[in-house]
Image (cartoon, rainbow, N blue to C red):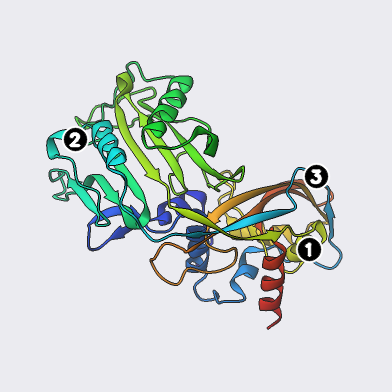
Protein backbone atom coordinates (compact mmCIF):
# COMPACT_ATOMS: atom_id res chain seq x y z
CA UNK A 1 0.00 0.00 0.00
CA UNK A 2 1.36 3.41 -0.96
CA UNK A 3 1.55 5.58 2.14
CA UNK A 4 2.04 8.76 0.12
CA UNK A 5 -1.49 9.36 -1.16
CA UNK A 6 -1.68 13.00 -2.23
CA UNK A 7 -4.30 15.30 -3.69
CA UNK A 8 -2.70 15.27 -7.17
CA UNK A 9 -2.85 11.46 -7.03
CA UNK A 10 -6.61 11.71 -6.53
CA UNK A 11 -6.96 14.12 -9.44
CA UNK A 12 -4.95 11.93 -11.78
CA UNK A 13 -7.04 8.92 -10.88
CA UNK A 14 -10.26 10.83 -11.53
CA UNK A 15 -9.48 10.51 -15.21
CA UNK A 16 -9.30 7.10 -16.81
CA UNK A 17 -8.03 6.33 -20.29
CA UNK A 18 -10.70 4.67 -22.40
CA UNK A 19 -9.27 1.70 -24.30
CA UNK A 20 -11.92 1.97 -26.99
CA UNK A 21 -11.55 5.71 -27.59
CA UNK A 22 -7.84 6.16 -26.76
CA UNK A 23 -8.57 9.42 -24.98
CA UNK A 24 -8.95 10.74 -21.48
CA UNK A 25 -12.61 10.87 -20.53
CA UNK A 26 -14.54 11.47 -17.37
CA UNK A 27 -15.80 8.14 -16.11
CA UNK A 28 -16.47 8.87 -12.44
CA UNK A 29 -16.81 12.29 -10.96
CA UNK A 30 -16.32 13.99 -7.64
CA UNK A 31 -17.04 11.88 -4.61
CA UNK A 32 -17.72 8.57 -6.38
CA UNK A 33 -14.29 8.82 -8.00
CA UNK A 34 -12.83 9.83 -4.64
CA UNK A 35 -14.19 6.70 -3.02
CA UNK A 36 -12.87 4.53 -5.82
CA UNK A 37 -9.38 5.96 -5.36
CA UNK A 38 -9.53 5.41 -1.64
CA UNK A 39 -10.55 1.81 -2.10
CA UNK A 40 -7.84 1.19 -4.69
CA UNK A 41 -5.19 2.71 -2.43
CA UNK A 42 -6.01 0.13 0.23
CA UNK A 43 -7.21 -2.69 -2.00
CA UNK A 44 -5.84 -5.29 0.39
CA UNK A 45 -8.19 -3.99 3.06
CA UNK A 46 -11.06 -2.42 1.13
CA UNK A 47 -14.41 -4.09 1.50
CA UNK A 48 -18.09 -3.30 1.60
CA UNK A 49 -18.08 -2.48 5.30
CA UNK A 50 -14.55 -1.79 6.55
CA UNK A 51 -12.75 0.37 4.01
CA UNK A 52 -13.99 3.60 5.60
CA UNK A 53 -12.10 2.69 8.75
CA UNK A 54 -8.78 2.95 6.88
CA UNK A 55 -9.40 6.65 6.24
CA UNK A 56 -10.95 7.65 9.56
CA UNK A 57 -9.12 8.70 12.73
CA UNK A 58 -9.02 5.93 15.32
CA UNK A 59 -9.73 8.13 18.33
CA UNK A 60 -9.38 6.64 21.75
CA UNK A 61 -12.20 6.70 24.27
CA UNK A 62 -10.32 9.52 26.02
CA UNK A 63 -10.47 11.84 23.00
CA UNK A 64 -13.20 14.41 23.47
CA UNK A 65 -15.13 15.09 20.26
CA UNK A 66 -16.70 18.53 20.53
CA UNK A 67 -19.28 20.02 18.18
CA UNK A 68 -19.05 23.80 17.73
CA UNK A 69 -20.27 24.08 14.13
CA UNK A 70 -23.30 26.26 13.49
CA UNK A 71 -26.21 24.30 12.05
CA UNK A 72 -28.94 26.93 11.91
CA UNK A 73 -28.05 27.63 8.26
CA UNK A 74 -28.72 24.01 7.27
CA UNK A 75 -32.08 22.94 5.84
CA UNK A 76 -34.16 20.44 7.76
CA UNK A 77 -33.98 18.03 4.83
CA UNK A 78 -32.27 17.63 1.46
CA UNK A 79 -33.43 16.05 -1.78
CA UNK A 80 -31.91 12.93 -3.26
CA UNK A 81 -31.93 13.02 -7.07
CA UNK A 82 -31.94 10.33 -9.71
CA UNK A 83 -30.28 10.54 -13.10
CA UNK A 84 -32.64 10.32 -16.07
CA UNK A 85 -31.78 8.22 -19.16
CA UNK A 86 -29.45 9.89 -21.68
CA UNK A 87 -31.09 12.21 -24.17
CA UNK A 88 -29.70 13.99 -27.25
CA UNK A 89 -28.41 17.49 -26.71
CA UNK A 90 -30.55 20.19 -28.29
CA UNK A 91 -29.51 21.26 -31.78
CA UNK A 92 -28.98 24.82 -30.51
CA UNK A 93 -26.62 23.58 -27.78
CA UNK A 94 -24.63 21.50 -30.28
CA UNK A 95 -24.42 24.40 -32.72
CA UNK A 96 -23.22 26.82 -30.02
CA UNK A 97 -20.64 24.30 -28.80
CA UNK A 98 -19.25 23.81 -32.34
CA UNK A 99 -18.99 27.56 -32.90
CA UNK A 100 -17.45 28.15 -29.48
CA UNK A 101 -14.81 25.51 -30.24
CA UNK A 102 -14.20 26.99 -33.69
CA UNK A 103 -14.60 23.65 -35.48
CA UNK A 104 -17.38 24.65 -37.88
CA UNK A 105 -15.32 23.37 -40.79
CA UNK A 106 -15.85 19.84 -39.46
CA UNK A 107 -19.61 20.18 -39.77
CA UNK A 108 -22.48 20.30 -37.30
CA UNK A 109 -23.51 16.90 -35.91
CA UNK A 110 -27.21 16.18 -35.64
CA UNK A 111 -28.73 15.53 -32.19
CA UNK A 112 -28.26 11.89 -31.24
CA UNK A 113 -27.66 9.64 -28.26
CA UNK A 114 -24.48 8.42 -29.97
CA UNK A 115 -21.13 9.88 -29.01
CA UNK A 116 -19.42 12.24 -31.45
CA UNK A 117 -15.69 13.00 -31.61
CA UNK A 118 -13.38 15.21 -33.61
CA UNK A 119 -9.84 13.87 -33.54
CA UNK A 120 -6.59 15.75 -33.71
CA UNK A 121 -3.69 14.97 -35.95
CA UNK A 122 -1.11 12.66 -34.43
CA UNK A 123 1.08 14.22 -31.78
CA UNK A 124 4.89 13.71 -31.72
CA UNK A 125 4.35 10.44 -29.88
CA UNK A 126 2.07 9.16 -32.61
CA UNK A 127 -1.11 9.37 -30.54
CA UNK A 128 -4.32 11.02 -31.70
CA UNK A 129 -6.74 12.43 -29.16
CA UNK A 130 -10.13 14.02 -29.23
CA UNK A 131 -10.18 17.81 -29.34
CA UNK A 132 -13.98 18.03 -29.36
CA UNK A 133 -16.52 15.56 -28.05
CA UNK A 134 -20.24 15.24 -27.44
CA UNK A 135 -21.06 12.37 -25.10
CA UNK A 136 -24.78 12.09 -24.31
CA UNK A 137 -24.24 9.02 -22.11
CA UNK A 138 -22.28 11.15 -19.65
CA UNK A 139 -24.11 14.35 -20.65
CA UNK A 140 -20.79 16.03 -21.43
CA UNK A 141 -19.43 18.30 -24.14
CA UNK A 142 -15.76 19.21 -24.14
CA UNK A 143 -13.13 20.95 -26.22
CA UNK A 144 -9.33 21.24 -25.95
CA UNK A 145 -7.39 23.37 -28.40
CA UNK A 146 -4.33 21.89 -30.08
CA UNK A 147 -2.92 25.37 -30.73
CA UNK A 148 -2.39 26.71 -27.25
CA UNK A 149 -0.27 29.85 -27.20
CA UNK A 150 2.10 29.58 -24.23
CA UNK A 151 2.89 33.30 -24.17
CA UNK A 152 1.65 35.55 -21.38
CA UNK A 153 0.44 38.26 -23.75
CA UNK A 154 -2.91 39.82 -22.81
CA UNK A 155 -4.20 36.91 -20.73
CA UNK A 156 -7.66 37.96 -19.45
CA UNK A 157 -7.92 38.97 -15.81
CA UNK A 158 -10.05 37.26 -13.18
CA UNK A 159 -13.17 39.34 -13.72
CA UNK A 160 -13.01 38.90 -17.49
CA UNK A 161 -12.72 35.11 -17.34
CA UNK A 162 -15.60 34.96 -14.90
CA UNK A 163 -17.79 37.11 -17.13
CA UNK A 164 -16.87 35.10 -20.23
CA UNK A 165 -17.63 31.84 -18.43
CA UNK A 166 -21.14 32.96 -17.51
CA UNK A 167 -21.71 34.22 -21.07
CA UNK A 168 -20.59 30.89 -22.55
CA UNK A 169 -22.64 28.91 -20.03
CA UNK A 170 -25.74 30.85 -21.11
CA UNK A 171 -25.12 29.69 -24.68
CA UNK A 172 -25.55 26.14 -23.39
CA UNK A 173 -28.84 27.08 -21.78
CA UNK A 174 -27.51 27.16 -18.23
CA UNK A 175 -29.17 29.48 -15.73
CA UNK A 176 -26.73 31.58 -13.69
CA UNK A 177 -28.96 31.02 -10.66
CA UNK A 178 -27.96 27.34 -10.74
CA UNK A 179 -24.23 28.05 -10.90
CA UNK A 180 -21.61 29.19 -8.42
CA UNK A 181 -18.21 30.49 -9.50
CA UNK A 182 -15.12 28.83 -8.04
CA UNK A 183 -11.89 30.75 -7.57
CA UNK A 184 -9.99 31.55 -10.76
CA UNK A 185 -6.92 29.37 -11.28
CA UNK A 186 -3.82 30.15 -13.36
CA UNK A 187 -1.42 28.17 -15.47
CA UNK A 188 2.28 29.04 -15.79
CA UNK A 189 4.04 27.39 -18.71
CA UNK A 190 7.29 25.52 -18.26
CA UNK A 191 8.75 24.53 -21.61
CA UNK A 192 7.00 25.56 -24.81
CA UNK A 193 6.64 23.45 -27.95
CA UNK A 194 9.83 24.93 -29.35
CA UNK A 195 11.77 23.96 -26.26
CA UNK A 196 12.22 27.49 -25.00
CA UNK A 197 11.45 28.55 -21.47
CA UNK A 198 8.49 30.84 -21.00
CA UNK A 199 7.55 32.87 -17.96
CA UNK A 200 4.45 34.37 -16.40
CA UNK A 201 0.84 33.24 -16.62
CA UNK A 202 -0.20 31.67 -19.91
CA UNK A 203 -3.84 30.98 -19.02
CA UNK A 204 -6.61 31.55 -16.53
CA UNK A 205 -9.53 29.26 -15.94
CA UNK A 206 -12.65 28.94 -13.86
CA UNK A 207 -15.29 26.37 -13.07
CA UNK A 208 -18.93 27.29 -12.57
CA UNK A 209 -20.19 24.53 -10.31
CA UNK A 210 -23.76 23.32 -10.57
CA UNK A 211 -26.08 23.94 -7.65
CA UNK A 212 -29.07 21.85 -6.59
CA UNK A 213 -31.46 23.55 -4.17
CA UNK A 214 -28.74 26.08 -3.39
CA UNK A 215 -26.17 23.36 -2.59
CA UNK A 216 -23.19 23.07 -4.93
CA UNK A 217 -21.37 19.97 -6.11
CA UNK A 218 -18.18 18.97 -4.36
CA UNK A 219 -14.70 19.42 -5.81
CA UNK A 220 -11.19 18.67 -4.63
CA UNK A 221 -9.58 21.66 -6.31
CA UNK A 222 -9.96 24.81 -8.37
CA UNK A 223 -8.83 23.43 -11.72
CA UNK A 224 -10.70 20.13 -11.75
CA UNK A 225 -13.68 19.58 -14.01
CA UNK A 226 -14.70 16.36 -12.32
CA UNK A 227 -17.98 17.78 -11.06
CA UNK A 228 -21.11 19.03 -12.71
CA UNK A 229 -21.14 22.45 -14.25
CA UNK A 230 -19.20 24.41 -16.84
CA UNK A 231 -15.44 25.01 -17.10
CA UNK A 232 -13.61 27.53 -19.27
CA UNK A 233 -9.92 28.27 -19.74
CA UNK A 234 -8.64 31.28 -21.69
CA UNK A 235 -5.10 31.94 -22.86
CA UNK A 236 -3.24 34.70 -24.63
CA UNK A 237 -5.51 37.38 -26.13
CA UNK A 238 -8.55 35.59 -24.75
CA UNK A 239 -8.14 32.46 -26.88
CA UNK A 240 -10.31 29.57 -25.68
CA UNK A 241 -7.91 26.83 -24.66
CA UNK A 242 -10.61 24.51 -23.38
CA UNK A 243 -14.16 24.24 -22.13
CA UNK A 244 -16.19 21.47 -20.57
CA UNK A 245 -19.89 21.05 -19.90
CA UNK A 246 -21.19 18.29 -17.60
CA UNK A 247 -24.92 18.58 -16.99
CA UNK A 248 -26.97 15.39 -16.49
CA UNK A 249 -30.75 15.51 -16.57
CA UNK A 250 -31.87 15.01 -12.98
CA UNK A 251 -35.17 14.49 -11.23
CA UNK A 252 -36.04 14.74 -7.57
CA UNK A 253 -36.49 11.30 -6.05
CA UNK A 254 -37.13 11.79 -2.34
CA UNK A 255 -36.30 14.14 0.52
CA UNK A 256 -34.48 12.95 3.61
CA UNK A 257 -33.94 14.58 6.98
CA UNK A 258 -30.57 15.97 8.06
CA UNK A 259 -28.58 14.06 10.64
CA UNK A 260 -28.12 15.69 14.02
CA UNK A 261 -24.69 16.80 15.30
CA UNK A 262 -24.83 13.93 17.78
CA UNK A 263 -25.34 11.43 14.96
CA UNK A 264 -22.44 12.86 12.95
CA UNK A 265 -20.20 12.77 16.02
CA UNK A 266 -21.17 9.13 16.38
CA UNK A 267 -20.01 8.57 12.79
CA UNK A 268 -16.67 10.22 13.58
CA UNK A 269 -16.26 8.01 16.61
CA UNK A 270 -17.32 4.95 14.61
CA UNK A 271 -14.94 5.45 11.66
CA UNK A 272 -17.72 6.38 9.23
CA UNK A 273 -15.96 9.51 7.89
CA UNK A 274 -13.08 10.21 5.52
CA UNK A 275 -10.07 12.46 6.11
CA UNK A 276 -9.34 14.64 3.08
CA UNK A 277 -5.75 14.96 1.82
CA UNK A 278 -3.76 18.13 2.37
CA UNK A 279 -1.44 19.39 -0.38
CA UNK A 280 0.96 20.76 2.24
CA UNK A 281 1.07 17.45 4.14
CA UNK A 282 1.15 14.68 1.54
CA UNK A 283 1.36 11.69 3.89
CA UNK A 284 -2.39 11.09 4.30
CA UNK A 285 -2.10 7.85 6.22
CA UNK A 286 0.52 9.32 8.52
CA UNK A 287 -1.82 12.22 9.27
CA UNK A 288 -4.68 9.84 10.02
CA UNK A 289 -2.46 7.90 12.42
CA UNK A 290 -1.33 11.12 14.11
CA UNK A 291 -4.92 12.27 14.59
CA UNK A 292 -5.57 9.26 16.80
CA UNK A 293 -3.45 10.91 19.50
CA UNK A 294 -5.57 14.06 19.74
CA UNK A 295 -6.78 15.04 23.19
CA UNK A 296 -9.74 16.94 21.76
CA UNK A 297 -11.27 17.03 18.29
CA UNK A 298 -13.48 20.04 17.65
CA UNK A 299 -15.80 20.32 14.65
CA UNK A 300 -15.97 24.01 13.74
CA UNK A 301 -17.91 24.06 10.46
CA UNK A 302 -20.26 21.89 8.40
CA UNK A 303 -21.02 22.46 4.70
CA UNK A 304 -23.40 20.34 2.61
CA UNK A 305 -22.42 19.30 -0.92
CA UNK A 306 -23.85 17.14 -3.67
CA UNK A 307 -22.05 14.42 -5.57
CA UNK A 308 -22.81 11.59 -7.92
CA UNK A 309 -23.31 8.40 -5.93
CA UNK A 310 -24.18 7.66 -2.33
CA UNK A 311 -21.82 8.35 0.57
CA UNK A 312 -19.90 5.22 1.54
CA UNK A 313 -20.93 3.14 -1.47
CA UNK A 314 -18.14 1.99 -3.77
CA UNK A 315 -18.76 2.15 -7.53
CA UNK A 316 -19.24 -1.31 -9.03
CA UNK A 317 -18.91 -0.50 -12.73
CA UNK A 318 -18.01 2.23 -15.20
CA UNK A 319 -21.59 3.44 -15.61
CA UNK A 320 -22.46 6.91 -14.31
CA UNK A 321 -24.13 6.62 -10.89
CA UNK A 322 -27.90 6.71 -11.03
CA UNK A 323 -28.19 8.55 -7.72
CA UNK A 324 -27.06 12.07 -6.84
CA UNK A 325 -27.05 12.59 -3.09
CA UNK A 326 -25.74 15.05 -0.49
CA UNK A 327 -23.00 14.61 2.10
CA UNK A 328 -21.07 16.99 4.34
CA UNK A 329 -17.63 18.48 4.50
CA UNK A 330 -16.53 19.08 8.09
CA UNK A 331 -13.81 21.47 9.18
CA UNK A 332 -12.22 20.55 12.48
CA UNK A 333 -9.21 21.13 14.71
CA UNK A 334 -7.33 18.33 16.45
CA UNK A 335 -5.68 19.52 19.67
CA UNK A 336 -2.73 17.46 20.95
CA UNK A 337 -2.04 19.60 24.02
CA UNK A 338 1.13 21.29 22.74
CA UNK A 339 0.07 21.63 19.10
CA UNK A 340 -2.97 21.38 16.88
CA UNK A 341 -3.85 20.31 13.34
CA UNK A 342 -6.64 21.60 11.05
CA UNK A 343 -8.54 18.79 9.39
CA UNK A 344 -11.14 18.47 6.65
CA UNK A 345 -13.44 15.47 6.70
CA UNK A 346 -16.21 14.09 4.56
CA UNK A 347 -19.14 12.62 6.44
CA UNK A 348 -22.74 11.55 5.90
CA UNK A 349 -25.27 14.34 6.33
CA UNK A 350 -28.52 12.43 5.85
CA UNK A 351 -30.03 10.59 8.80
CA UNK A 352 -30.69 7.55 6.60
CA UNK A 353 -27.01 7.36 5.60
CA UNK A 354 -25.99 7.42 9.26
CA UNK A 355 -28.28 4.46 9.93
CA UNK A 356 -27.10 2.58 6.83
CA UNK A 357 -23.41 3.03 7.56
CA UNK A 358 -23.80 2.24 11.25
CA UNK A 359 -25.68 -0.97 10.46
CA UNK A 360 -23.03 -1.96 7.87
CA UNK A 361 -20.30 -1.52 10.47
CA UNK A 362 -22.11 -3.70 12.97
CA UNK A 363 -22.67 -6.60 10.56
SS for tag 2? loop
The vertical placement of 193 against 311, above or below, is above
Mark 1 crowd level (few <14, some 14–19, many ≥20, 10 Å Cα):
some
How far separated are the C-alphas under marks 1 and 2? 53 Å
State the image quarter where residue 157 is shown. top left
Q: Nearer the viewer, mark 1 or mark 2?
A: 2
Closer to the chain start, of discs 1 and 2, is: 2
Q: Which mark is residue 263?
A: 1
Q: Position of residue 56 (x, y in %)?
A: 67, 63
Comparing 47 with 138, the one in front is: 138
Q: Nearer the viewer, mark 1 or mark 3?
A: 3
State the image quarter where residue 118 is shown. top left
Whether residue 54 appears in this view of the structure is yes
Q: Residue furthest top?
A: 154
The vertical placement of 252 against 52, above or below, is above
SS for tag 1? helix
Closer to the chain start, of discs 2 and 3, is: 3
**Left or right position of 259 against 48:** right
The residue carrying mark 3 is 72
Q: Residue furthest bottom?
A: 363
**Mark 1 in CB contact with mark 3 (< 8 angstroms):** no
**Left or right position of 127 against 4:** left
**Left or right position of 292 against 233:** right
SS for tag 3? loop
Q: Position of residue 26 (x, y in %)?
A: 37, 54
Residue at horizontal 67 percent and vertical 71 percent from the top: 357
Whether residue 348 appears in this view of the structure is no
The residue carrying mark 2 is 103
Residue at horizontal 44 percent and vertical 49 percent from the top: 226
Mark 2 crowd level (few <14, some 14–19, many ≥20, 10 Å Cα):
some
Amino acid sequence: MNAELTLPDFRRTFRQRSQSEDKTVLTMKAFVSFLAVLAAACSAFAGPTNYLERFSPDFSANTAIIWQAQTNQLPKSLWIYKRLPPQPFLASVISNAVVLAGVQDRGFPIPSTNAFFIWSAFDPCGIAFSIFSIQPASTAISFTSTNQDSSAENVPDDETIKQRAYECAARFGLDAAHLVANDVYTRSPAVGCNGTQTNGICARGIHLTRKLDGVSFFTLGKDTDDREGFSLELGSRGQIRSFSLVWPNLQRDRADSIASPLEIVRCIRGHRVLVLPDEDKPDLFGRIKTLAGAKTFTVTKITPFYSEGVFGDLPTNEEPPKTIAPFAELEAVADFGNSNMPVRLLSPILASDVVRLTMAKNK
